[in-house]
Amino acid sequence: MAQKRFMTLADVGEVLNISSSQTYALVRSGELPAIQVGGRGQWRVETQVLEDYIARAYQRTAASVKDGIHVEQEL
Protein backbone atom coordinates (compact mmCIF):
# COMPACT_ATOMS: atom_id res chain seq x y z
CA MET A 1 0.00 0.00 0.00
CA ALA A 2 1.30 3.47 -0.90
CA GLN A 3 2.31 5.84 1.86
CA LYS A 4 0.01 8.82 2.39
CA ARG A 5 1.40 12.15 1.21
CA PHE A 6 -0.16 14.21 4.02
CA MET A 7 -0.61 13.61 7.72
CA THR A 8 -2.97 15.17 10.25
CA LEU A 9 -1.48 16.96 13.24
CA ALA A 10 -2.66 14.04 15.38
CA ASP A 11 -0.66 11.67 13.16
CA VAL A 12 2.40 13.91 13.40
CA GLY A 13 2.09 14.06 17.18
CA GLU A 14 1.90 10.30 17.31
CA VAL A 15 5.06 9.91 15.20
CA LEU A 16 6.96 12.42 17.35
CA ASN A 17 5.38 11.14 20.57
CA ILE A 18 4.26 14.64 21.58
CA SER A 19 0.91 16.15 22.50
CA SER A 20 -1.43 17.75 19.99
CA SER A 21 -0.78 21.17 21.53
CA GLN A 22 2.97 20.71 21.10
CA THR A 23 2.43 19.68 17.48
CA TYR A 24 0.22 22.71 16.84
CA ALA A 25 2.85 24.97 18.44
CA LEU A 26 5.51 23.63 16.04
CA VAL A 27 3.23 24.44 13.11
CA ARG A 28 2.20 27.86 14.44
CA SER A 29 5.83 28.86 15.00
CA GLY A 30 6.76 27.84 11.46
CA GLU A 31 9.31 25.32 12.71
CA LEU A 32 7.27 22.54 11.11
CA PRO A 33 5.80 23.72 7.78
CA ALA A 34 2.17 22.76 7.18
CA ILE A 35 -0.77 23.72 4.98
CA GLN A 36 -4.40 24.39 5.73
CA VAL A 37 -6.96 22.60 3.59
CA GLY A 38 -10.71 22.54 3.26
CA GLY A 39 -13.40 24.87 4.44
CA ARG A 40 -12.46 24.39 8.08
CA GLY A 41 -8.78 25.03 7.45
CA GLN A 42 -7.59 21.74 8.87
CA TRP A 43 -3.81 21.42 9.11
CA ARG A 44 -1.84 18.86 7.13
CA VAL A 45 1.89 18.12 7.13
CA GLU A 46 3.52 16.50 4.15
CA THR A 47 5.21 13.23 5.10
CA GLN A 48 8.51 14.27 3.50
CA VAL A 49 8.40 17.61 5.35
CA LEU A 50 8.09 15.73 8.64
CA GLU A 51 11.01 13.45 7.69
CA ASP A 52 13.10 16.54 6.84
CA TYR A 53 12.16 18.12 10.20
CA ILE A 54 13.27 14.97 12.02
CA ALA A 55 16.57 14.90 10.09
CA ARG A 56 17.21 18.57 11.02
CA ALA A 57 16.45 17.79 14.66
CA TYR A 58 19.05 15.00 14.60
CA GLN A 59 21.59 17.40 13.07
CA ARG A 60 20.89 20.12 15.68
CA THR A 61 21.16 17.60 18.49
CA ALA A 62 24.42 16.13 17.18
CA ALA A 63 25.91 19.63 16.81
CA SER A 64 24.85 20.54 20.36
CA VAL A 65 26.33 17.35 21.78
CA LYS A 66 29.57 17.92 19.86
CA ASP A 67 29.78 21.46 21.22
CA GLY A 68 29.15 20.20 24.74
CA ILE A 69 25.79 21.91 25.03
CA HIS A 70 23.28 19.92 27.05
CA VAL A 71 20.00 19.74 25.13
CA GLU A 72 17.06 19.74 27.54
CA GLN A 73 14.31 21.08 25.34
CA GLU A 74 12.09 18.36 23.91
CA LEU A 75 11.12 18.29 20.22
Image (cartoon, rainbow, N blue to C red):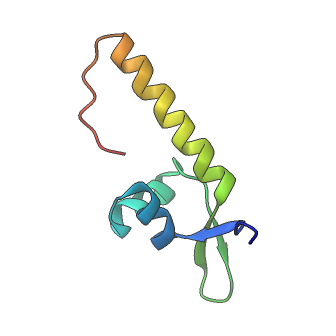
Tell me where residue 50 appears, x and y as whole percent: 58, 52
Residue 30 x/y as whole percent? 54, 51
The residue depicted at 54 percent of the width and 51 percent of the height is 32
Q: Position of residue 2 (x, y in %)?
A: 76, 68
> 31 or 63, which lies in front?
63
Furthest toward the top, the residue is: 67
Split into 4 quadrants, where in the image is the N terminus? bottom right
Looking at the image, residue 65 sits to the left or right of residue 9; the answer is left
Left/right placement of residue 29 relative to residue 45 reads left
Tell me the residue at 45%/54% (across/down): 26
In the displayed orientation, state which residue is furthest to the bottom.
Answer: 39
Image position, residue 10 (x, y; %): 46, 72
Q: In what quadrant of the picture does the C terminus appear?
A: top left
Please identify the quarter of the rendering in which residue 62 is found: top left
Front one among 4 and 18: 4
| Residue at the front extreme, as displayed | 1
x 47%, y 36%: residue: 57
Q: What is the total number of numbered labels drawn onto the structure image? A: 0
Q: Is residue 37 left or right of residue 61?
A: right
Residue 4 vs 27, above or below: the answer is below
